[in-house]
Image (cartoon, rainbow, N blue to C red):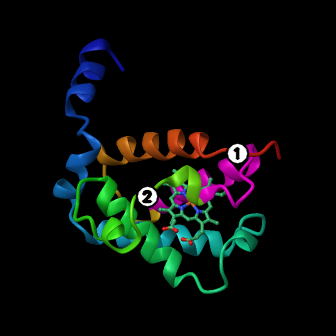
Amino acid sequence: MDGAHSHEKAQMAPHATEIYGRLGEAVFWRIARAFYARIELQSELRPMFPRDLEEPIRNQAEFLIQYFGGPTSYSERKGHPRLRMRHAQFAIGVRERNAWVACMEGALIDAAVPEPERAVMSKYFADTATFLMNADT
Ligand code: HEM
């Protein structure tokens, strides 16, 4: 890609909090459902999650809706996200981090998230998953 094009792309990249307004609500539920459908099949990560995935699906969808600029139902129901604290009980090393990110990258495709929003979301997930690492596994 030449310089003019990368400049154009950088200008077009929306801020995270604009994404809900640009894509609407349904895509976040599609992402959460697609993500947990992949977790269901991920034998290393599946045991970390409860047997019934409906509550995790709701947690993830409402969290993403809030983070990407939509209504704040997640915090009204659960309080401040405090993601580091909420993940402290799970051992997250580089293997777990990479497996989680792979499930989420697949979910963004399954949910047909368009560009340029998809790139903004991918970067957020990669960075946050690294930030949540808390073990040497
Ligand atoms: C971008 C990275 C991540 C984000 C944004 C994220 C977000 C969340 C959120 C919002 C919850 C619900 C917490 C609650 O309300 O109680 C959650 C739960 C959970 N997360 Fe993560 N997470 C990330 C990475 C990871 C990684 C890398 C792992 C482990 C491999 C992981 C494992 C779990 C587990 C086991 C739960 C419990 C399921 C539940 O109660 O909803 N997460 N995560």
Could you tell me residue 111's position as x and y percent?
40, 65
Give the magenta-colored segment's residue range: 87-109
Depth order, front residue of 16/111: 16
Q: Name the residue under label 2.
A: 81
Q: Residue 32 carries which label?
A: none
Q: Does the residue labelled 1 lie within 8 Å of ligand 1?
A: no
Depth order, front residue of 91/25: 91
Q: Quadrant of residue 12?
A: top left
Question: How far, Cα to Cα, is label 1 from label 2?
Answer: 17 Å
- Total marks drawn? 2
Answer whether residue 44 is magenta in the image.
no
Q: In this view, does 31 lie above or below 118?
A: below
Q: How crowded is mark 2: few (under 14 residues within 10 Å), some or many (20 or more)?
A: few
| Magenta-colored segment: predominant secondary structure | helix
Residue in view at x 67 percent, y 85 percent: 51
Extreme residue in the left direction: 21
Residue in view at x 37 percent, y 72 percent: 29
Depth order, front residue of 114/99: 99
Side of 88 where 33 appears, left or right: left
Answer whether residue 98 is magenta in the image.
yes
Which element carries disc 2, helix, strand or loop?
A: loop
Extreme residue in the right direction: 137
Q: Name the residue under label 1.
A: 134
Q: Quadrant of residue 4?
A: top left
Could you tell me residue 134's position as x and y percent?
70, 45
Q: Is mark 2 within 8 Å of ligand 1?
A: yes
